[in-house]
Amino acid sequence: MDRIKIVHILHSVGGVDTSLRMILENIDATKFESVVIHGTKDNSNFYDNKNNRLKEYFLPIERDISLLKDLKSIIEARKIIKKEKPNLIHAHSAKGGVIGNVMGKFVSSTTVFHTPQAYSFLSAESSIKRRLYVLIERLVKSKNSVLLASSNSELERGLKEVKYKKENTVLFDNCIAPIKLDSNYSDLASYNLPENYICTVGRPSYQKNIEMMVEVIREAKKQIPDIHLVIMGIGVVSPNTENVKQLIKSYDLQNNTTLIEWTERERIFHIVDRSKFYISTARYEGLPYAIIEALSLSKAIIASDSDGNKDLVIDGHNGFLIAQEDIESFTEKVVTLYRSTALRATQEQNSYQLFMERFNLNNNIQKLEQIYEDFA
């Protein structure tokens, strides 16, 4: 039997890159042939579940809008699609979605899935820019476009704002295989971390709103003088890093914070595992892998009540959901959870149970395979 060929199109960084690799390394390679089209500056080298390296093509796909590069990417992508003749196109990320959905207008018999991993219009800091981004999402859709949402929040956004028809939407939650800590990455001595700390993973940016997290630590320090926050994910695509560093300095929080630049994903797991709990102040998410990983590691979560976060945290059950920008309530819950061993233990157990029931890739991958088969 011929394999179903799927061409994936994306800007392969961060959670989008993680999502695609989770798919490629777990779907049955005897049933599905995968081809990857991604940016020239992206992470590369993709493998299937038989550890075979996959065919990949490079385009000038970048996060920001560039009419010249985007037009070139669309033209080159069309040539690749004509050559590969896929049964399905799966576009990931905002930019991948634009290119993939435009491809759908040229291959009307081929379904084009779009998994935004957080819609781009959620990043808009002005109403005019937001309306423009929403309009672009609506215009590039074709009759064969299907929203393959990464969370229920994302699905609802697609229905209400991008105006997908219900029959053209399907849900497949982001998920991961249960984490097994690798002892080769257990040495954290170089970071000089205190015995007790809380942590987060997220690049300083408008989306992650790390500045608010620093404000929360400033307030929590008044009640817990030695409270310590570890921020992981500082990298090249971290536009607000200097703002965060300046805020830490101005509030005299140098001894209460640790900023960690790039480190191996396996080492991040050890840092999260040893923390008291996980925290997120994000303004929006798709379905954040960092929190899914924290659930797998049995961590209680304090998170902003935003898209993505609210799909992973049940308020009072495995953590707390706090209204966005509510520094006072955030601080209150941080202090409460920090001080209560019993409460943390209960919420940690609930986090792991929630992970196993809903976000365990080993249990869910066949659902995605069935989606691919149905639409192919």
Image (spheres, grey):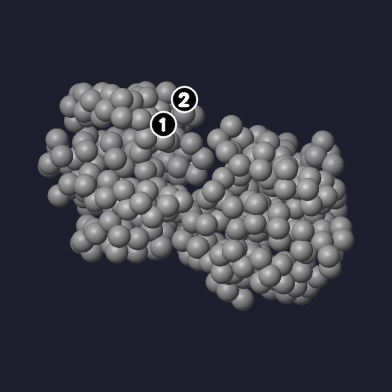
Identity, as a three-letter code, of the amino acid under mark 2: Lys
Residue 300 x/y as whole percent: 66, 65
Residue 167 x/y as whole percent: 20, 61
Q: Which residue is mark 2?
A: 41
Task: Left or right? Give the position of 9 relative to 325.
Answer: left
Residue count near mark 2 (Cα–Cα under 10 Å), binned few <14, some 14–19, many ≥20: some
Residue count near mark 1 (Cα–Cα under 10 Å), binned few <14, some 14–19, many ≥20: many
Q: Is residue 73 visible?
A: no
Distance, label 2 to label 1, CA atoms, is 8 Å
- Tell me whether circle 2 and circle 1 mark residues in contact (CB < 8 Å): yes
* Above or below 173: residue 344: below
**Residue found 57% across the figure and 38% down from its top:** 239
Q: Report the residue that reaches farthest toward the left.
A: 109
Q: Which residue is mark 1?
A: 62
Q: Secondary structure at mark 1?
A: loop
**Residue found 84% across the figure and 68% down from its top:** 223
Quarter holding residue 75 = top left
Residue 208 x/y as whole percent: 57, 51
Q: Secondary structure at mark 2?
A: loop
Whichever of labels 2 and 1 marks the residue nearer the N terminus, that label is 2
**Residue found 18% across the figure and 27% down from its top:** 82
Identity, as a three-letter code, of the amino acid under mark 1: Glu
